[in-house]
């Protein structure tokens, strides 16, 4: 770590990661069992840099850069099919997948009311090489068939506002209440090679799986004996599966998801039992209280809608 001045810290470093993923599959050829091996093998040096400048105890500026990667898991990489439990469709792995390299840049301003309460504003940029995306592929079956493809590259640019604030500034009666959350706005863009443009139905589009807007809100009541948290999550419409084409034959349309609004409640009661010299916590969880609908669309028309239902649980933990 470097410290050019009392208020300025710089930290940098690098790590090396090696990965070797090998999958052996057994097939028959002229009644003879043959082994097919798919392999992912690479070494990477991943640098990182962070800097913090404290204008004073309330105002801080931060910058961070990091290089990382995502690699296909066995499900995505293996050359075989399984049945998707939700969509009743075949999902095939793609042994030609390669890892995704990611360069991330983040610039943040933070105002700190004290050591805990704060509000921050960030802007970020990510450059992805060979992002892995979900696609719809050709099939002769009555069931749909999904798989995975590497696009050439993609960029993500966004803004994020986050906060954590005790509500005692409203009135002292709210000193045990905390309001926290974050709002993210982003835009992404995928770049395709000429060969990929001939393969994908949509050549100019956003990155699969990302919602342009995400909001999380949380209201917490907390003291030594009790913690009650009510949370809310909303994600905007997002591209979830990309359609491919075979020449002039279009194999379906791009699929979009409209995620449900989610409201969850967690209630924790803490108590001590001296007879057994232990501290206990009873935890009650109520999830998906709105039971809002998830909607999938194709070509502007509803292709699928469903609800997952509410769930409730009670558990007890002890620390001796």
Image: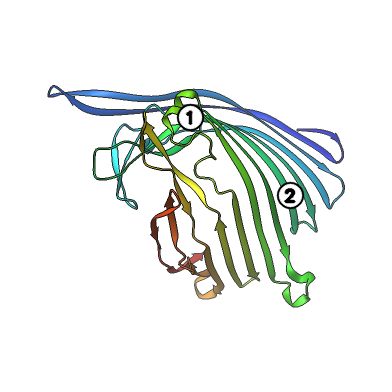
User: Image height check: is 180 above or below 104?
Assistant: below
Question: Which residue, as the protein is rendered here, is positioned at the far left?
Answer: 31
Question: Which residue, as the protein is rendered here, is positioned at the far bottom?
Answer: 173
User: Image height check: is 83 above or below 39?
Assistant: below
On screen, residue 223 versus residue 255, left or right, reads: right
Q: Where is mark 2, residue-wise?
A: 121
Label 1, secondary structure: give it. loop
Quarter placement of the N terminus: top right
Can you give x and y, in whole percent of width and height, for residue 148 in the image? 40, 36
On screen, residue 87 versus residue 318, left or right, reads: left
Label 2, secondary structure: give it. strand
Image point (68%, 41%), residue name: 124
Question: Which residue, as the protein is rendered here, is positioned at the far front?
Answer: 248
Q: Nearer the viewer, residue 52 or 230?
A: 230
Residue 242, quarter of the rendered image? top left
Can you give x and y, in whole percent of width and height, for residue 258 in the image? 49, 55
Image point (66%, 37%), residue name: 125
- Within 10 angstroms of label 2, few (less than 14), some, or many (20 or more) residues? some
Q: CA distance from mark 1 to mark 2?
A: 31 Å
Q: Nearer the viewer, residue 261 or 69?
A: 261
Residue 206, quarter of the rendered image? top right
Q: Where is mark 1, residue-wise?
A: 99
On screen, residue 37 versus residue 308, left or right, reads: left
The label number, if any, that marks residue 234 in the structure image: none
- Within 10 angstroms of label 1, few (less than 14), some, or many (20 or more) residues? some
On screen, residue 228 versus residue 80, left or right, reads: right
């Amino acid at each position: 770590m470097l410290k050019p001045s009392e208020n300025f810290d710089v930290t940098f470093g690098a790590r090396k990661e090696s990965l070797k993923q090998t999958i052996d599959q057994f097939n028959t050829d002229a009644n003879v069992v043959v082994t097919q091996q798919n392999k992912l093998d690479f070494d990477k040096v991943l640098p990182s840099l962070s800097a913090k400048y404290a204008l004073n105890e309330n105002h801080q500026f931060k910058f961070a850069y990091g290089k990382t990667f995502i690699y296909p898991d066995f499900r995505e990489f293996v050359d075989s099919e399984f049945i998707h439990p939700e969509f009743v469709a075949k999902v095939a792995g793609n042994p030609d997948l390669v890892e995704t390299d990611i360069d991330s840049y983040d610039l943040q301003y933070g105002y700190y009311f004290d050591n805990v309460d704060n509000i921050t504003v960030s802007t970020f940029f990510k450059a992805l090489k060979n992002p892995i995306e979900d696609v719809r592929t050709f099939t002769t079956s009555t069931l749909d068939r999904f798989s995975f493809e590497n696009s050439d590259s993609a960029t993500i640019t966004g803004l994020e506002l986050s906060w954590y604030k005790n509500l005692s500034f409203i009135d002292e009666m709210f000193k045990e209440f905390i309001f926290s959350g974050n709002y993210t706005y982003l835009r992404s863009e995928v770049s395709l090679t000429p060969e990929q443009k001939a393969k994908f139905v949509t050549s100019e589009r956003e990155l699969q799986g990302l919602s342009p807007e995400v909001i999380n809100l949380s209201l917490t009541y907390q003291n030594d004996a009790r913690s009650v948290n009510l949370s809310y999550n909303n994600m905007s419409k997002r591209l979830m599966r990309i359609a491919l084409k075979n020449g002039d034959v279009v194999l379906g349309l791009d699929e979009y998801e409209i995620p449900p609004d989610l409201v969850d409640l967690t209630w924790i009661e803490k108590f001590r039992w001296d007879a057994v010299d232990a501290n206990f916590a009873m935890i009650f969880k109520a999830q998906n209280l709105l039971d809002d609908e998830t909607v999938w669309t194709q070509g502007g028309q509803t292709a699928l809608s469903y609800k997952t239902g509410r769930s409730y649980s009670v558990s007890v933990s002890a620390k001796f």
